[in-house]
Amino acid sequence: MDKFDILKKYFGYPDFREGQETLIDSILSGKDVLGIMPTGAGKSICYQVPALLLPGITLVVSPLISLMKDQVHALNQAGIHAAYINSSLSESQISKALQLAAAGQYKIIYVAPERLETYEFLTFVERVEISMLTVDEAHCISQWGQDFRPSYLKIVQFINRLRKRPIISAFTATATENVKEDIVCVLGLENPYILVTGFDRKNLYFAVESPKKKDSYVINYIREHDTQSGIIYCATRKNVEKLYEKLKDEGVAVTKYHAGLESEERKKNQEDFIYDNCPVMIATNAFGMGIDKSNVRYVIHYNMPQSLENYYQEAGRAGRDGERAECILLYSAQDVAINRFLLDNKEQNSEYTKEEIDAVRERDEERLQAMIFYCMTTNCLREYILKYFGEKGNSYCGNCLNCNREYEESDVTHAAKSIISCILEARQRYGINVIAGILAGDERAKLREYGVFSYKSYGNLREMNEVEIKRIINYMLTEGLLFQTNDKYMLLKISPEADEVLHGNRSVIMKKAKTEPEKEKESAVKSKSSSKTRRSDTLNSRGLELFEQLRELRTAIAREEGMPPYIIFADKSLVDMCVKVPLNKSDMLKVSGVGENKYARYGERFLDVIREYTGGVREKFYFGNP
Ligand code: ADP
Ligand code: ZN
């Protein structure tokens, strides 16, 4: 068997996706590799396919128990012998698993990093051939990363202990240069083949909205998307609880997750969500790592997160199946205050020196600032994200709110002049919050302390609110009229170009979204039209009916087997069944995601439903061309 046979037979896919094949080839030629690909790109296949072709065992180090379990279930479903070793198993279960492994029962073994240095595990690896060591979520090894895990450093010691060095493959979705260098260096990759695919997730639609009432927005959204599964992230446990109660009162099937719940309840709620008993999950960012649910159709952020890194990771849990999904951030000025508070109270690593803590705080502040700018930009949101992660975007993606919104140009020269004068009057000693506060004539105590009430500029832009003033400041920053100092204070400074504005030789024209009422109307229309997923764009009403029947069967099987539905078949496979209308085995094997093993297990039952529904006569269940 070659890699294509394996892809077809076990995973049911006809072709590799971008990047997969070259990574697999490199591994098979004995090279170390590092694959940096966004969530949903298909990293797992890059090590699972070669694992089946290499002579010995592949060990996969993975940080999360739930993730391992999911992966192993999926592999077993596909007919691949795999197991996991972590603290969710009892000692005797672990011994049993290792015994079977030593007897050659498993090709792929997932293992938690802490296990690597246990005596039992070390004796086990002495006795078997380890062909490859795969490090999943490899960014956890970097202290520069967002989720550094000290236990990941054990991987290095482990490799050094092995009699024969295996091929090492590492995978992550984090692309920053620091993290990349750390992975190569700390893991000791030898002359590795490094592949970085684009970070763009084309199927995700991005939007930032500032509704007056976030609760009503969320309730309406869920109503319009009532058959779909989604996650709503809140910044605090309190917000989770409040929103949860509200939605429950509205009769929505919701569940919740945050670190304040008992672990039993967390587990149950998570399963309710994964098994589609409760399609809507309200959670803090404690939820989601290791959640592989592929049919999440929307991720709404009720509050702005602390960084774009967090945002892209959380939002990226939508649409892992490659189908259209929406990522909506609900922004309000209060979110900034909440985040500053959270940062100020963040628990710092006690091993850090004061300088290091300051450095961390400074980086956090920069990240937060970039996040705020995301919420304020009128340019393409996707471009903003891609640029942040060091990639080039187009200035128009056509699949974000800003690209779809109508703007009017507005002359903000007068306000710009007031802003510049104010910064000069303050002798360039303050940041964006104070400057906007002065101009808006805000009365908060802090400003009194600074003695700015006597400024000539004080209250000069009273007719605007602070958010509007900040938007203009933000625009001036992007135009290079102003800049910020590179420290944690981020003081606003004037650049030479600002002189032209001040002396009346240059006007400042800013793109502004149309006025609020129109905007709301528009976005209501917009979200109506976009609420339809590709499924209902593709399938006609007969097709949708068949899809529902297939989905019911999938739910029934999932219950019987105690598996999440998406592990049986992805939505995408069900849609493909409606498009291809398979009536026999060979037709069925052409459906995306139907491999031989899955066919043997479930194929006939799905065929029965299709035959019954069509009476054995193929009809067209979709619009246009498939
Ligand atoms: P990642 O780990 O990069 O986030 P996964 O490995 O979980 O992504 O893959 C995401 C989804 O894409 C899974 O449902 C997987 O089965 C699917 N997939 C992976 N490779 C292919 C392929 N070559 N063709 C079709 N689907 C694929
Ligand atoms: Zn765009």
Image: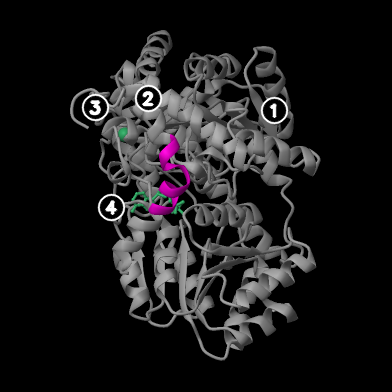
The residue that mark 3 highlights is 618
Residue 509 in view, yes or no: no
User: Alpha-carbon neighbours of circle 3 within 10 Å: few (<14), some, or many (≥20)?
Assistant: few
Mark number displayed over residue 239: 1
Of marks 3 and 4, the one in the foreground: 3
Q: Is residue 416 above or below residue 85?
A: above
User: Alpha-carbon neighbours of circle 4 within 10 Å: few (<14), some, or many (≥20)?
Assistant: some
Q: Earlier in the sequence, mark 4 or mark 2?
A: 4
Of the residues shown, which amino acid type is indicated by label 2? Answer: Glu
**Count of numbered tags:** 4
Cα distance between the residues tagged 4 and 1:
45 Å
Could you tell me residue 510's position as x and y percent? 32, 26
Of the residues shown, which amino acid type is indicated by label 4? Answer: Pro
Q: Residue at x 42, y 76 (%)?
A: 54
Tell me: 355 left or right of 298. right
Cα distance between the residues tagged 2 and 3:
11 Å
Circle 3: element type: loop
The residue that mark 2 highlights is 612
Of marks 4 and 1, the one in the foreground: 4
Of the residues shown, which amino acid type is indicated by label 1? Answer: Asn
View extreme (right): residue: 262
Cα distance between the residues tagged 1 and 3:
51 Å
